[in-house]
Amino acid sequence: MSAPVQSPRRICFRKFELDISSGELHKDSQRISLPPKAFEVLRCLVERPGEVVTREDLRARLWTADTFVEFDDSLNHAVKKLRQALGDSAETPEFIETLPRHGYRFIAPTNGGATPEPTPKPARRFPARLLATALGLLAIMAVLFAYDVGGLRQRLSGHSAEPAIRSLAVLPLLNLTGDPQQDYFAEGMTDALITDLAKIRAVRVISRTSVMQFKDVKKPLREIAQALGVEGILEGSVQRSRGRVRITAQLIRVSTDTHLWAQSYERDTSDVLTLQAEVAQAVAREINVALTPEESAHLSRARSVNPEAYEAYLKGQSHWYWLSREHLDTALEYFDLALQKDPNYARAYVGVANVWMMRGDAGFMPPSEAMPKAKAAVSKALALDDSLAEAHIAFASFAGPYDHEWSIAEREFRRGIELNPNSADGHFMYADFLISMKRVDEWNAEIHKTLELDPFNPFFQCFYGWHLIYLGRYDEAIAQLHKVLETEPDFSSEHMGLWGAYYKKGMNDEALAEARRFFSVLHDREVEEALTHGYSEGGYARAMHRGAEVLAGRSKRIHVPAVRIARLYAHAGDKDEALRWLKKACDERETPLTHLGVAWDWDFLRSDSHFQDLLRTMKLPT
């Protein structure tokens, strides 16, 4: 490429003025926002008016050769932004003429605003003291300018830098393989980018569940950003072929539709973790966020991973998110396969632990069988990698509910959140811990942080409704749970919450209807029918008693969570049976008893000495 002509400080054309020194374009003295690459393309063109500037010239000058960049798309986008800013048209151009597949030519007349060099004046001799003072003032000004104290550098240079982006959403990466069976890989890479970026405390990063609502959704980015409450969007694609992984990403400031950065990265599948960390570090640079030494260390710590182990882990995660009995079984198979391929893969141990905890928490098996296996797996994960936020949060999740070691649980929650400040799971579980401890002010901060990070997560939205019932805010809870019901009509927890809220308000017909829906979603037709027959026999209390009898009888053959039976007896007003089954649940260390001190089901038992004994056994506030 021929060397550009010596450019004047300002170049004028029509009503526009390009200020080379400040990097700004003005029209009639009004500043026009331009993405950095668009400005540089315009500069290249106006410095050589009337000449053809080839696409290869622009590539060599403006795009570095040591990165995998989607050059054609990036250049086309820059020219499109230029035409929008200038009010130009590709069909009838006034400023930028396109030579298809060759380059561009600036066709508007220009005139530079260079200022002629002034004639030197004879030097004057300054007294030594005045010279020293002047030099001292210059040194002070240099320091103020270098550190931009009070925005001095920005004001003197004639432009103000864009503010740093403080909230970000990573939209689901497009799967470019053309094979829908590879969607799990694209989703897994999206998860990984979110996880890496979430370690940066200075930025709020939206969690996976909420961004997945926008997979394959054709909506304007501004609308998506408004729904998620973010200033920046990271979007892109992923492709895997012949042992290589390629991620292409672009970062957009939504308020101005400015493309801040676009780049592609490609590595062997064994280096996929390094690739993810590189993208996260690049994004941090582009949004003007300074990383702390610990954050830099976390992002630089990525190691090679066995490709087969990583593949199995991603497949396990894709099944884990469904949380059904069958999907949990499949997830565990894949996590175990990942550990066969790489016995030191810490994240796979966390996956194993989560499966066992969910099996015990959901009542699929006795906690006494599930939780020790969860504890062993997460302890192994922490031994391998103590920097895994997910491992600390998982450890806390059974240290309190199962071991009743609440101080250890709080320590681990705090450590997990410290390592990943944007972990919606961590903030939610800590909020659930705090409300069980009756620390309502701290709960309020954590639950709202959760909902900021994951606004469309139905699980968190539902349990926020539960927490409102614990606080006696029944009407708010009902409104909140009905909001979840609109998008997730078959979510059992929301029906249990509505059942509890209506029960506390004395609305027995509505409470019974939600109890029946709860067991219907669980596909428990026998209890559902028992509730119906019992209600016709003797109203709400009789319905609850009949349902409890069905579950109590079933528990002699298969595992039934004792807390589920105790709840029905409590609603029936049978104090003795409710306490007996609660004692059994406590002996089996069932995790739902975390809420024993606040849950609505046990209010009429609270003054009973046996109930107080249970609270003391669990080391909960009495």
Image (cartoon, helix red, strand yellow):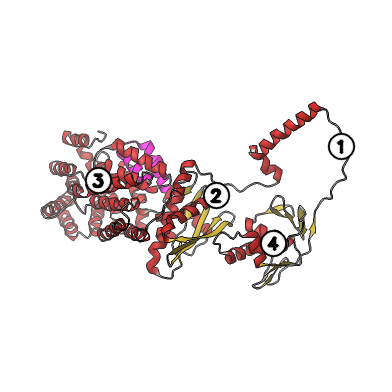
Q: Quadrant of the N terminus?
A: bottom right
Count neighbours of disc 2 (C-alpha within 10 A) and say few if under 14, some if 14 to 19, many if 20 or more: few
Q: Name the residue nearer the viewer: 206 or 269.
A: 269
Count neighbours of disc 4 (C-alpha within 10 A) and say few if under 14, some if 14 to 19, many if 20 or more: some
Circle 2 residue = 285
Mark 3 or mark 2, which has the lower sequence index?
Answer: 2
Mark 2 or mark 4, which has the lower sequence index?
Answer: 4
**Kind of residue indicated by mark 1:** Ala
Mark 3 or mark 4, which has the lower sequence index?
Answer: 4
Mark toward the viewer: 1 or 2: 1
Mark 1 or mark 2, which has the lower sequence index?
Answer: 1
**Kind of residue indicated by mark 4:** Leu
Verify CB contact (< 8 Å) between mark 1 and mark 4: no
Q: Is residue 506 visible?
A: no
Q: Name the residue nearer the viewer: 533 or 297.
A: 297
> Please, what secondary structure does the residue beneath circle 3 have?
helix
Q: Residue at x 32, y 44 (%)?
A: 383
Mark toward the viewer: 3 or 2: 2
Disc 3 to disc 4, how far (Cα)? 63 Å
Q: Give how far across and how far down residue 457 sits, in percent.
A: 38, 53
